[in-house]
Amino acid sequence: MLRSLKGIVRFKRFEKNPAQRRLNKAANIEDLRRVSKRRLPAGVFDYIDGAAEDERTLRNNVSSFSNYEFKPRVLRDVSNIDLSANILGVQTPFPLICSPTGFTRIAHHDGELAVSRSAARSGIPFALSTMATRSIEEIQTTTQPVNSAHSLSPRNWFQVYVWKDRGVLRDLLDRAKEANFEAIVITVDTAVLGRRERDVRRGFTLPPQLGIGTVLDGIRNPSWTWDFITNEPIRFANVVGKSADDGSSAISLADHVNAQFSQSLSWNDIEWFRTQWDKKIIIKGIQTVEDAKLSVKHSVDAIALSNHGGRQLDDAPAPINLVGAVTDIMGDELEVYCDGGIRRGSDIIKAIALGADACMIGRPFLYGLGAAGEIGVDWVLNFFKEGMQQTMALLGAKNLSELNLDLIERKR
Ligand code: FNR
């Protein structure tokens, strides 16, 4: 009886790794978001997931992708699909970049190390935030290929906020240069910090303070709490000992940004960066065609159309809605990236068809990290890659140069 039952029923092998078990049950980014919501303390999840004021920008970033529909072509041989792209002059397996996110260790103790390793395994660029909780040197060491058989191909970029203290800034740039970082990303949408009301309501600080609410939350989320108390303290790793606010005491992010970062940042400062950094420069946070034109004038290498994932100005334009207008007037003078609201491979295909050179993601890999650590980030990058592949096949496009306005239109 048992033998004949075995003949018909195929038992699934039990997955011993609990993180992998969680990933096996996920079908998309929203599923990972739900898993990380369950596993992280509410304040931590809200810091990652939340946005400014009524969060309309965040919702609009995501929902605006559904304003566009494909015009799929059939009976085209799609047996070989090539997703490779050229990003800043380097052949890249698929057109995706991991955006800079501050305080990443809050989701998992490996933090930025996990994200940079995963990006390096995929061969795509990773941008380390000024507010990172792993240092420039740690990233360099962990993503360095050990020998020629090593499968990591690191492409590290450094994101800069403009510190009032130019000495701190100069030191960061020198270290990034020394560590062979390929580019700097100057974030220009953060003159002051947006009002993130989930954090205001909770009195959320970085690092999180252990009040009674956190203790209760810790009991509900034992694995995160264990991770938090058994690993070295979370700090702004790049400025430890160099700035009064290095994360060694709890601060509100708004106080930190408003005290440390320059509100007088202007186009002249972009010229200053040119004198300090002779490799590639990307401006992140362009939100109008006019500023895109000015970026060309200031001869930067790329711009990221971005509203900081909706975390700054509420009712800012959705990046995907800017792609067509910006690339229309642009030609090939600089690369254009679409950053914000990307949750599926098909979103990336839409952005490329409208004229973008690549896309950037933030929350998706943080949800992956919170749900399952480094293999969660791998899952996310693979999800986007497979989604792109599938969309191209269904759209009848073999490579990125075949993605153009003939294959997409704005819904009427
Ligand atoms: C960010 N973002 C960000 N950007 C930046 O230039 N420097 C930073 O330190 C941070 N920190 C940060 C933390 C967290 C928790 C999030 C979610 C985002 C913005 C980020 O680089 C990117 O622009 C957005 O995340 C893109 O939107 P999606 O992909 O999250 O929708």
Image (cartoon, rainbow, N blue to C red):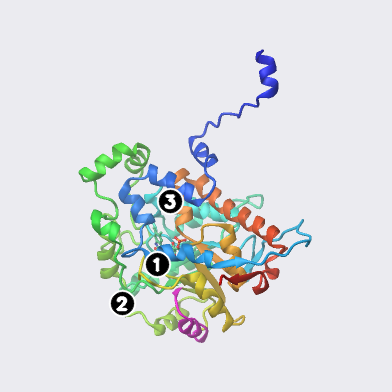
Query: Which residue is label 1 attached to?
Result: 57
Residue 357: where, in percent of width, then height?
59, 71
Q: Can you see residue 388?
A: yes
Type of amino acid at the residue the image marks with label 3: Gly
Of badges 2 and 1, the one in the foreground is 1
Identify the element where label 1 is drawn: helix
Identify the element where label 3 is drawn: loop
State the mark number for residue 111: 3
Residue 88: where, in percent of width, then height?
59, 71
Query: In terms of sequence position, does the residue under pointer 3 or pointer 2 come before the other?
Result: 3
Type of amino acid at the residue the image marks with label 1: Thr
Question: Marks 3 and 2: CB-CB under 8 Å?
Answer: no
Secondary structure mostly seen in the magenta stretch = helix
Q: Is residue 305 toward the left or the right of residue 4 in the image?
A: left
Query: In terms of sequence position, does the residue under pointer 3 or pointer 1 come before the other?
Result: 1
C-alpha span from label 3 to label 1: 26 Å
Give yes or no for residue 290 being in the magenta stretch. yes
State which region is magenta: 285-298
